Image: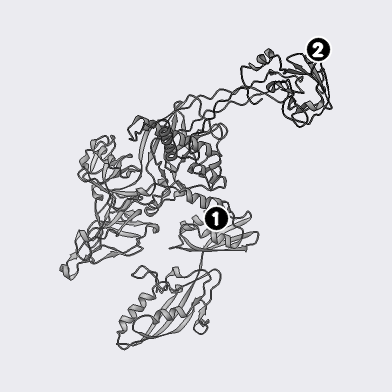
Amino acid sequence: MIYFCSQKNRRASVLQSPDLNGIDYLEIAGDSVCERKLLVRLLKDARAVALTPDNVTVTGGQAVEVSSVLAATDEDPFVLTVNLKQSGDFSTYVLALVAGAGITDSPDGFDPQLCSVSFSFKAGCPTPADCVPDNCCPASPQSPPDINYLAKDYEAFRQVMLDRLAALSPSWGEAHVPDVGIALLETLAYAADHLSYQQDAASTEAYLGTARSRISLRRHAHLVDYRIGEGCNARTWMCLTVRADNVEIPWGTLFYVRVPGLPLVAKSGDPVEQSLAKAGHPVFSVMQKATAFLEQNEMRFYTWGDAVCCLARGATEATLEGNFTTLKVGDILIFEEVVGPKTGDPDDADPAHRWAVRLTRVDTTDYKQRTLVDPLTQKLITRIAWSQEDALPFPLCVSSTTDLENDANPVAQVSVARGNVVPADHGTWISGETLGRVPDAPPDSAESVGCTCGSQISDAGPRPRFYPELMHSPLTFSAALDGASSASEFLAPDPAGAQPQIKIQSDDGGDWEAERDLLSSDDSERVFVAEIERDSSVFLRFGDGQYGMSPKAGSSFSATYRVGNGSVGNVGRDTLMHAVLPPSFALPLASIASVRNPLGAKGGIDPEDMEHIRQYAPFAYQTQLRCVTEADYGDQAATIKGVREARGTLRWTGSWHTAFVSTDPDSALTPRLITNVTRDLNVLRMMGTDLAVEGAILIGLRIEMAICVDPEHFQGSVFTALTKVFLAGNQCTGEPGLLNASNFSFGQTVYASPLVAAAQSVEGVLSATLTVFTRMDDPFIDGVSQGFLTMGRLEIPRCDNDPNHLDHGAFVLHLDGGK
């Protein structure tokens, strides 16, 4: 049979033919599945049919041989009996009547279309299906559409859909964005892009090297105890000029970048504020309320009748002209050069000569509580002082005389001190933003049947997913104001201590606090984590009922938070010129004449980028967490702010070991620095080991050189040039001098050859000879002959050439020759 037809007309035609016979159907004799007797029923009388085993073939699965063919009997004249040597398997077999062995044609008198029949030896096996074969004519196969199944992003999905539309509807050729079809197509492409990302997210976000979400990287990094940096907002000092006394500057006052044409002072809600907000510049706000006074607008330095004066580099005290009773300890003053010392022109004032200090002492009366005055002139004065951390980094010119081109006129007030200074940082508050409602928990899953008959498994009900996103970004991370004890420290906050400026409240009146993680929280604490994505969007993750309280289904949340973070807030000096006062400000706006930031904003740090996390997080576990050896104490102390270098020594002090940390500070070894080093090292020291912080052993060097001056040069000029090279401070170019303390370190061997070479390189020096080169604590060591001086492990060489501290070294020049 080469055709399969639903309407079988051939059987009726053969029945009507007087000359043809054919197979009607086939049965397997008996009830056994292993029966080997086949009953072949023909359409007509078969008693005259004589067939042999060569006339019958049985083909299919396992090979089956025909042993004999029995002719039809009078009792059943239509049935031929075919005996087999073995039974077949579960395959479909075909019994065919042929003309002879090796011949495929049907025997004479048999219809070619009805001389074969399909059957199964296992037809007697129990089955729930109908035994009648269900053969149908399959539909013509359709060629699949030409679709790019590798499309995985928005652009690729959009192009795939456009290509498919071109094939389905060739007449549609609209490509304009406003078209409804294009809009719908792009919406579907957007949805497909997100769906594609979700399909890949499980494997993509599971690894640090492939994760595309910054939140995923944050969680991976936390596994190795690496806390990623979320950045820090910038901060600055705002200086106000007022026209009255006791002007209260409330918390919430905003400062905006200058926009020409707008008033300098406005109130919240005014159109001026809206215009300033539209400019899109960073916004700063007052961190602490303050009171401004008229007398602090500008304060002059008092020079006691002297002229051409300056506050030296490193100065920590000064005298003001006048009795400033409103000044108090803790106030901030900004010293500012207001005119050029050589020209007397305000336009020539150096804007780099500005410095902020926090007052540590204010004296307006003497020890008898009498008002301080100059006893010579009876002028009122005020003595002020500030901490060493705020020491002047440059000489501040107080009074001067202009150059000859400007008639050599005296200038009395080159620099002034300004008060009414308030702290401000980058960021503006957004209040009462609705975060939405916690969804109801999904219905519990149906109980499933276990592997054991009658057993049931019940799953715990799923928790409602509440992972809201803030509408505005970036979220502000700010360091605490009370963590800065000096004005300089305020402008250089520690970004590691910056906290997110956000508060969450639920509709039951509960306040939720932000934490870096939830691992240390229990189910009674209302806490959450603010997670920052790579595009600065902010998501809030709440507790799960074990680590932090889980939000109740149906409850609503609202957020109050600040927006503004990173280096974008590091605006330049004299940039913030507008003040927007809150409604609580009761005085007239005219009471504030102007606002400005004499110093540029600093401290703004961008959040750590994803590539930096990938590079640094895998090595976080290698961080030293315990000091074991002597070198560990020195290495860890050197990482503390204010310490340039340190060495540790373990000594047995009678009952236990003590780690003595010899410290070389950046400036001076103050009690505060000793306290900081001791505090930070205490958490790293070994149990049973005591800790003591001490100063390094300073070894003064005595250096004397004989200089032969060229006859064509003045001896004085050569001497001046040499002293500029062999300088314990910094040269005029800003480079450290040859004898600067930063050039010496622990255990350093000091060689004579660099000293001779430096002197020889000065113009006008014919020759330089080192005559004395020794340690001041051991003058019998002859460094000239051996060419070097060695130091102990805890010793640092010094040659400050300070007559007040001769133990810190001396440098002497002996000049001969020249003019």
Q: Where is residue 435 in the image (x, y as percent from the top left)?
A: 42, 30
Image side of residue 772 versus residue 682, left or right: left
Q: Is mark 1 on a helix, strand or loop?
A: helix
Mark 2 residue type? Asp
Nearest to the observer: residue 328 or residue 78? 78
Mark 1 residue type? Leu
Q: Residue at x 64, y 26 (%)?
A: 2
Give the quadrant of the C terminus. bottom left
Q: Where is residue 522 in the image (x, y as percent from the top left)?
A: 56, 34
According to the picture, the residue beneath numbered tag 1 turns out to be 681
Q: Where is residue 48 in the image (x, y as percent from the top left)?
A: 80, 16
Image side of residue 661 versus residue 98, left or right: left
Q: Is residue 205 visible?
A: no
Q: Residue at x 42, y 42 (%)?
A: 536
Classify residue 348 by image quadrant: bottom left
According to the picture, the residue beneath numbered tag 2 turns out to be 76
517 over 402 or under it: above or below: above
Crowd band around label 1 with a 10 angstrom C-alpha radius: few (<14), some (14–19), many (20+): many
